[in-house]
Amino acid sequence: MSDAVPPPLPPPTATAQGKFHCPACGAEATWNPAKRALICGYCGTESPAELETTPGGDAVIKEHDLVAALRGQDAKRGWQTERVQVLCQSCRAISVFEPSRIAQRCDFCGSAALVPYQEAKEAFSPESLLAFKISDVQVREAIRQWYGSRWFAPNALGTRAMTDQLHGVYLPYWTFDANVSADWQAESGYHYYVTEYYTDANGNRQSRQVQRTRWEWSSGHVDHFFDDELVCASKGVDRKLIAEVGSFPTKELVPYQAGFLAGWVVERYQIDLLAAAQHSREGMTAKLHSLCGRQVPGDTNRNLRVSPHWFNQTFKHVLLPVWLLTYQYHGTTYHVLINGYTGAIAGRYPKSWVKIFFLVVAILAFAGLVVLFGSRR
């Protein structure tokens, strides 16, 4: 699809209510991952984000009944503050940001083909999030070290890849909890050995031990609780890269507060609750079969049948932080993704054909020397 620059987006008609004002001078404050606080860009005053807590002082993380939500008894919707949404016509990501920001290019793929997006029904409100913990300074240094450890990467990559802007974004995720009570049946296999006699090529009688398997029916029961099974609802980021940057510590989630998003872009989920729940159930079912399989006695098993009963199914919509680097190198676009909470990094990078050529030459030269010295013996 063409990357031609579309007409400028119309300014939002609603008054910007997504700003957080500095308590000292009144200027706009944004969330700073290095300081773990809202920082005024004008006077530098720090102001912590307020967390919703219970009377006992514990942070509130809300779970919602999955069955009720799928039946149309929706959980809370909306963003708590005024937001603008744009759709990238290239990667199809839907970006959500404050009305005062003007979108020039997509934070996910760099395309300028952005158009206003209007949803038929407000999205589910985020229930909780992990705020950015890794700062942009830490990320830039981590990327330089990562490039330095890529032996085939061009030497100039570390500087050229830094010329494009680094973006911090919140990705949408669903988490699912469920209890399961399952009966299982299977055939348990027990190995035993018998002596087998045969005649070898020289006509001599020989013996050998041959494995046999005795099969017996067995059964059992498994009770298990699946906690915070994550399903990424993003379409703006390569799913392979998402898997490569590792998991997020959901036990450290904090209640959603708009202050954590001040100055940051959020991707609206495009994998809805129903599709995510089906994907999560498939994953939990596979894990359940593995749990049952480990209970089957014997040396091996076959024809495992599991009869599960699912109950107490809940979900949350959460936001998780990542850093994105999109850059051009010799006309090709590459992406690097960094976990904004743990710092884990994954990405694609160009290969230096000069380095590859000399490596091939070195391997061929070594192989030639081995053959040469081997022939002289």
Image (spheres, helix red, strand yellow):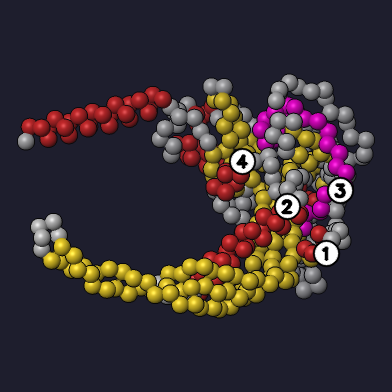
Q: Quadrant of the C terminus?
A: top left
Please name the residue that numbered disc 3 is placed on. Answer: 122
Foreground residue among 29 and 115: 115
Please name the residue that numbered disc 4 is placed on. Answer: 238
Bin the neighbour count of mark 3 within 10 Å (Cα to Cα): few under 14, some 14-19, many 20 and up.
few
Inter-mark Cα distance, 2 to 1: 16 Å
Residue 29 image offset from top left, x and y in percent? 78, 44
Please name the residue that numbered disc 2 is placed on. Answer: 275
> Which circle's residue, 4 or 2, is located before the other in the chain?
4
Residues in magenta? 104-131
Residue 306 image offset from top left, x and y in percent? 60, 70
Is residue 233 among what the camera can see?
Answer: yes
Please name the residue that numbered disc 1 is placed on. Answer: 68
Residue 281's place in the image compared with 6, above or below, is below
Kind of element beneath mark 4:
loop
Residue reaching furthest left?
377
Q: Is residue 122 magenta?
A: yes
> Which circle's residue, 2 or 3, is located before the other in the chain?
3
Q: Nearer the viewer, mark 3 or mark 1?
A: 1
| 285 left or right of 22 in image | left
Q: Nearer the viewer, mark 4 or mark 1?
A: 1
